[in-house]
């Protein structure tokens, strides 16, 4: 073999290695981005389930506490806001508003012992609690997927591929600042 063939073979091997690296990096970013989309859709499924349960809960509580009109309107408005939210940030904010409105609704229920004893109310409350747990797990999974994806977008050398193919960082699903504070317990 002469030296030209060796140099040509080395150049072809280097080009092939670069192409394989680009393909691998691109596919890794696509995989991470799709994992983020999938995990967000899991949150969406749980939020829809909760939204479907809320009208039944509101109607059940209305029967016992008809004069608490503001709370019912707030729950309905927050539910509508969540259904109309588009971006992760909007969904996160609307979810926080709905959680606050539901907290007020359950606080009203505490004032009506016959409501707390109602089997329909107990079942709805149990289903909502279970759904809230699922939403929490889904948010955690989503944020883990976002962390992995964002790391790929920012770390060298995959950040070069992310920049070349216009991969953008994803938003985390965040809680409201008021929910970060520990509740005050007084006796």
Image (tube, rainbow, N blue to C red):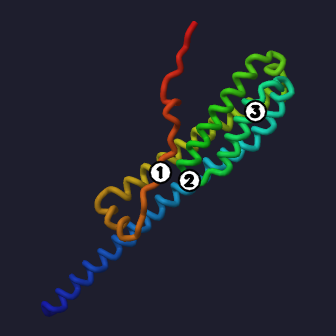
Q: Name the residue tied to disc 3.
A: 72
The answer to the question of whether label 3 and label 2 lie on touching residues, with beta carbons closer than 8 A, is no
The mark nearer the N terminus, 1 or 2, is: 2
**Residue 157 against residue 95 in the figure, above or below:** below
The mark nearer the N terminus, 3 or 2, is: 3
The mark found on residue 87 in the picture is: 2
Q: Could one spot residue 50 in this view of the protein?
A: no
What is the crowding at mark 1: few (fewer than 14 residues within 10 Å), some, or many (at least 20)?
some
User: Which residue lies at the image location 23% right of the left edge and 85% below the top edge?
Assistant: 9
User: Which residue lies at the image location 80% right of the left edge and 15% below the top edge?
Assistant: 113
Q: Could one spot residue 157 in this view of the protein?
A: yes
Q: Nearer the viewer, mark 1 or mark 2?
A: 2
The answer to the question of whether label 1 and label 2 lie on touching residues, with beta carbons closer than 8 A, is yes
Task: Residue lying at the far right in this picture: please name it.
Answer: 63
Mark-to-mark CA distance, 3 and 1: 31 Å
The mark found on residue 101 in the picture is: none
User: Which residue lies at the image location 68% right of the left edge and 31% below the top edge?
Assistant: 102
Locate residue 144, reporting x and y percent: 47, 46
Locate residue 105, reporting x and y percent: 72, 28
Q: Nearer the viewer, residue 108 or 135?
A: 108
**Residue 117 in which image quadrant:** top right
Label 1 sits on a secondary structure element that is: loop
Task: Residue lying at the far left in this picture: please name it.
Answer: 3
Q: Name the residue tied to disc 1.
A: 171
Mark-to-mark CA distance, 3 and 2: 26 Å
Q: Nearer the viewer, mark 3 or mark 2?
A: 3
User: Which residue lies at the image location 42% right of the left edge and 60% below the top edge?
Assistant: 168
**Residue 10 against residue 144 in the figure, above or below:** below
What is the crowding at mark 3: few (fewer than 14 residues within 10 Å), some, or many (at least 20)?
many
Locate residue 69, reporting x and y percent: 78, 29
């Amino acid at each position: 073999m002469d030296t030209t063939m060796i140099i040509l073979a080395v150049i072809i091997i280097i080009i092939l290695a670069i192409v394989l690296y680009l393909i691998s990096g691109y596919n890794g970013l696509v995989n991470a981005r799709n994992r983020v989309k999938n995990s967000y859709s899991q949150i969406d499924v749980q939020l829809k389930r909760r939204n479907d349960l809320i009208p039944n809960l509101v109607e059940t509580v209305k029967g016992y506490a008809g004069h608490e009109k503001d709370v019912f309107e707030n729950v309905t408005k927050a539910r509508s806001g969540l259904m109309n939210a588009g971006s992760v940030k909007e969904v996160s904010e609307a979810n926080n508003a709905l959680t606050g409105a539901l907290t007020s609704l359950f606080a009203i229920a505490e004032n009506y012992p016959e409501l707390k004893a109602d089997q329909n109310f107990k079942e709805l409350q149990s289903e909502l609690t279970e759904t809230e747990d699922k939403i929490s797990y889904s948010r955690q999974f989503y944020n883990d997927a976002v962390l992995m994806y964002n790391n790929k977008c920012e770390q060298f050398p995959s950040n070069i591929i992310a920049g070349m193919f216009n991969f953008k960082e994803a938003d985390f699903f965040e809680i409201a600042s008021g929910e970060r504070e520990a509740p005050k317990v007084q006796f």
